[in-house]
Image: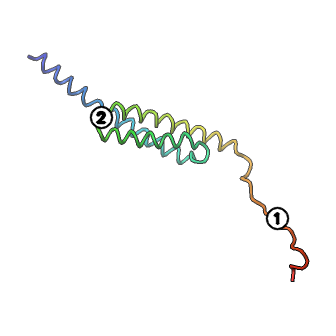
């Protein structure tokens, strides 16, 4: 009988690992997504930042439906994309030394009969 108790306890611990692991990765992904946005990911790494946002939202949704393995995988993708967005944004921001282009509009002189 002591063996059955140990197996039961191990079964309970294994069942609890899914939510804990998924929640941990979701938390890490949330922090990474905030960093990507703070690094101007929308400007310099739009694709990766958008993917991170979408994967994170789906990971939270799956976690809410108790699909912890799916939530873990989605959050891992969100984390990876957010880290890539942060890296790309930092690279592009430092290489973007030229000032942003300014629009200059020149109007033609109106004909003399319209100058009245």
Per the image, label 1 sits on a secondary structure element best described as loop
Per the image, label 2 sits on a secondary structure element best described as helix
Give the left or right position of residue 31, taking residue 42 as reference.
left
- Quarter where residue 28 is shown: top left
**Callout 2 crowding tier (Cα within 10 Å): few <14, some 14–19, many ≥20:** some
Rounded to the nearest angstrom, the CA distance separating label 1 from label 2 is: 62 Å
Residue found at x 46% / y 37%: 78
Give the left or right position of residue 115, taking residue 27 as reference.
right
Q: Nearer the viewer, residue 58 or 80?
A: 58
Report which residue position mark 1 lands on: 106
Question: Residue placed farthest to the left in the image?
Answer: 1
Q: Nearer the viewer, residue 2 or 83?
A: 83
Could you say where residue 48 lies in the image, as x and y percent from the top left?
A: 54, 39
Could you say where residue 57 lies in the image, as x and y percent from the top left?
A: 41, 43
Give the left or right position of residue 46, taking residue 16 as reference.
right
Question: Residue placed farthest to the front in the image?
Answer: 113
Residue found at x 46% / y 33%: 77
Question: Residue placed farthest to the bottom in the image?
Answer: 116
Residue found at x 53% / y 48%: 38
Pointer 1 or 2: first along the chain: 2
From what the image shows, is residue 3 above or below residue 9? above
Could you say where residue 68 lies in the image, as x and y percent from the top left?
A: 32, 33
Could you say where residue 113 lies in the image, as x and y percent from the top left?
A: 89, 79
Q: Quadrant of the N terminus?
A: top left
Q: Pointers 1 and 2 in contact (CB under 8 A)?
A: no
**Callout 1 crowding tier (Cα within 10 Å): few <14, some 14–19, many ≥20:** few
Report which residue position mark 2 lands on: 19
Q: Quadrant of the C terminus?
A: bottom right
From the viewer's perspective, is the residue at label 1 or at label 2 nearer?
1
Give the left or right position of residue 47, taking residue 102 as reference.
left
Residue found at x 28% / y 37%: 66
């Amino acid at each position: 009988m002591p063996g059955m108790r140990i197996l039961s306890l191990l079964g309970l611990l294994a069942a609890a690992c899914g939510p804990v692991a998924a929640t941990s990765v979701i938390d890490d992904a949330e922090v990474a997504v905030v960093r990507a946005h703070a690094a101007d990911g929308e400007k310099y790494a739009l694709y990766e930042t958008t993917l991170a946002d979408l994967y994170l939202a789906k990971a939270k949704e799956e976690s809410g439906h108790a699909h912890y393995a799916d939530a873990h995988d989605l959050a891992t993708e969100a984390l990876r994309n957010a880290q890539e967005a942060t890296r790309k944004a930092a690279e592009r921001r430092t290489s973007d030394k030229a000032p942003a282009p300014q629009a200059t509009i020149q109007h033609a002189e109106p004909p003399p009969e319209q100058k009245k």
